[in-house]
Amino acid sequence: MGNSAFSPCYKGSLPSHTPPLRIRVPRRGDGSESGRLRHQRASEMPKQIHEIKDFLLTARRKDARSVKIKRSRDVVKFKVRCAKYLYTLCVFDSEKADKLKQSLPPGLSVQEV
């Protein structure tokens, strides 16, 4: 009883949420320990664009490489590959999709999937 330094004084006061564990992952071909943190890969997810004007501005950028057009029964998806992200625009009107396809920059490679 006299040894109170070993008795827990925080009964029930531990935090319920612990922060996520961050692990360093080496880059490909690089054996060093200076890799990126694994939790940063979530920021490289595709981005969705909701306006046609914004999509055309993105397609005219210097780092835009290609456009893929995916047609389904009720939606046409335009996907432009840029240096960091893949940007997607969903068009639900087929007439607007045809006009958008004609107004894409001529230097981009367009692939219909």
Image (tube, grey):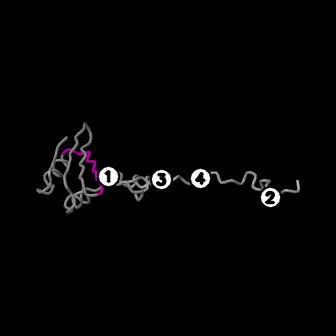
Magenta span? 84-94
Magenta-drawn stretch contains 41:
no
Q: Nearer the viewer, residue 35 or 112?
A: 35
Image check: 88 left or right of 8? left
Judged left or right of residue 56, residue 46 is right
- Callout 3: SS: loop
Q: Residue furthest right?
A: 2
User: Alpha-carbon distance for marks 2 and 4?
Assistant: 25 Å
Q: Which residue is mark 4?
A: 18
Residue 2's image quarter?
bottom right
Earlier-in-chain disc, 1 versus 4? 4
Per the image, the residue denoted by label 3 is 23
| Amino acid at dot 3 | Ile
The circle drawn on residue 29 is 1
- When the figure is inspected, residue 24 is found, relative to residue 77, above or below; the finding is below
Residue 100: x %, y % from top left: 18, 52
Q: Residues within 10 Å of mark 2 (few under 14, many from 20)?
A: few
Please name the residue shown 71% across and 54% down the image: 13
Q: Residues within 10 Å of mark 3 (few under 14, many from 20)?
A: few
Q: Are marks 1 and 4 in contact (CB under 8 Å)?
A: no
Q: Secondary structure at mark 2?
A: helix
Mark 1 vs mark 2: in front: 1
Q: Amino acid at mark 2?
A: Ala
Helix or strand or loop: what does disc 1 sit on?
loop
What's under tag 4, amino acid-wise? Thr
Mark drawn on residue 58:
none
For disc 2, the marked residue is: 5
Query: Relative to the observer, which residue lies in front, 30 or 70?
Result: 30
